[in-house]
Amino acid sequence: MLTPETLPDVQRALADAKVDGWLLYDFRGVNSIATGLLNLDGFASRRVFGWVPREGKPVAITHAIEQGPWRQWPAAWGKEVYSSWRALEGYVRDLVNGKRVAMEYSPGDAVPYVDRVPAGVLDLVRAAGAEVVTSGELISRLYAVWTPAQLDSHRKAARIVADVARGAFADVGERLRAGETVHEHEVQQRIRDAFTRAGLETDHGPNVSAGANAANPHYEPSADAPRRIVPGELVLIDLWAHEPGNPYADQTWMASVGAPNDRAVTIWTAVRGARDAAIALLRERISARTPVLGGEADDAARAVIEQRGYGQYFTHRTGHSIDSRDLHGSGPNLDNLESRDERALIPGVGFSIEPGIYIPGDVGMRSEVNGFIEPDGVLITPQRLQRDLFIV
């Protein structure tokens, strides 16, 4: 959030990025990064800009009939009020003409999580005489990072999420051994109830997938189409939750109903090896204080699965950003498949590590943990990683 207290840090980052300023733009919520940093209080239906210069005071460009959302904008900072498009474009020109400007723009849409500004707005800003560059690294440094308190909250949530997952598997096993019928959606509801009791929130899910359903990474069970969990099959539980206002913990765990067959163990070993390869690369680079890109961690995990012969079935990135606001955040992703994320993993950012193998109509497996970059190392949550398939 941009405040008089945080402004010096923002301006230092702008100087490091060698830009003259950061031009934040939003229209009806298309750019949540801008609205989050500008701390707009309420919905704005007209175009807004916020100019944060490398030196000097920020300036807001606001519409005449929508001053309410700017009630927290410091009075000592600048504010221009427009009604006509001519006035709006004139204010933009006055601010950015001849300057090198960062915006939420990703050349070639390489990183969609950064690419928030419409092409027409980029045309407008360039016509005003500005050189536009991506704000991707600024987003990592100033928007995506966690505070120490948020890290503490995440660690607590990670412990609870892991315990809830283990408890759900144990309950499935007990009920099946008692001769009861167990459905995926019932396990899902048990998990949601456990989160509520623990003071955690989740936006949807979790994903409880039995058998071939786990081959769909975004499968969700439903009471409208109940699916029994039966002996001899694999069960995937993907669950995520957080304390209100704090970063999510996002994990995936695997179990076998009865002893797994050799093929299941082979696939699981490949997935686990990919996860551990990404972690090993991160630990090696960060401890040596050598820059590491999110895409490089994706490459390390993907290489293991390809070497085991399952490369075509690893159909998503290795990990997504978990920023201080969103489960699928705007910081660097572990991705060199779906997008070209060449942002560095810097201290303070969090992300998932979740390689998977999905053979349609047959089997799906994933192992998911979370990572957080510290100044001299990588924190992995939960503390105790899954090494072998649970047997329930």
Image: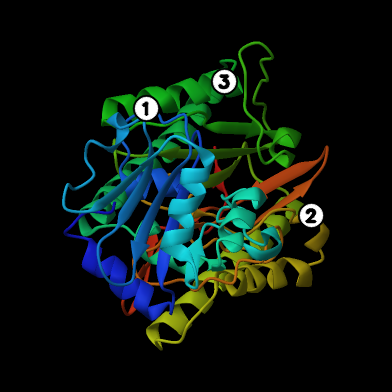
The residues tagged by marks 2 and 3 sit, at their Cα atoms, a distance apart of 26 Å
- Mark 3 Cα within 10 Å, few/some/many (few <14, many 20+)? many
Mark 2, residue position: 313
Specify which label sits upstream in the sequence, 1 or 2: 1
Mark 3, residue position: 185
Q: What amino acid is found at the position of numbered circle 3 in the picture?
A: His
Residue at 34 percent of width and 66 percent of height: 53
Residue at 62 percent of width and 24 percent of height: 221
Q: Quick check: marks 1 and 3 in contact, CB under 8 Å?
A: no
Q: What amino acid is found at the position of numbered circle 1 in the picture?
A: Ile
Q: Is residue 315 above or below residue 31?
A: below
Specify which label sits upstream in the sequence, 2 or 3: 3
Q: Quick check: marks 2 and 3 in contact, CB under 8 Å?
A: no
The residues tagged by marks 1 and 3 sit, at their Cα atoms, a distance apart of 48 Å
Q: Is residue 161 above or below residue 219?
A: below
Residue at 53 percent of width and 71 percent of height: 343
In terms of image quadrants, where is residue 17? bottom left
Mark 1, residue position: 65
Q: What amino acid is found at the position of numbered circle 2 in the picture?
A: Tyr
Relative image position of residue 244 (x, y in whole percent): 29, 35
In terms of image quadrants, where is residue 340? bottom right
352 to the left or right of 299: left
Residue 249 seen anywhere in this rendered image of the structure: no
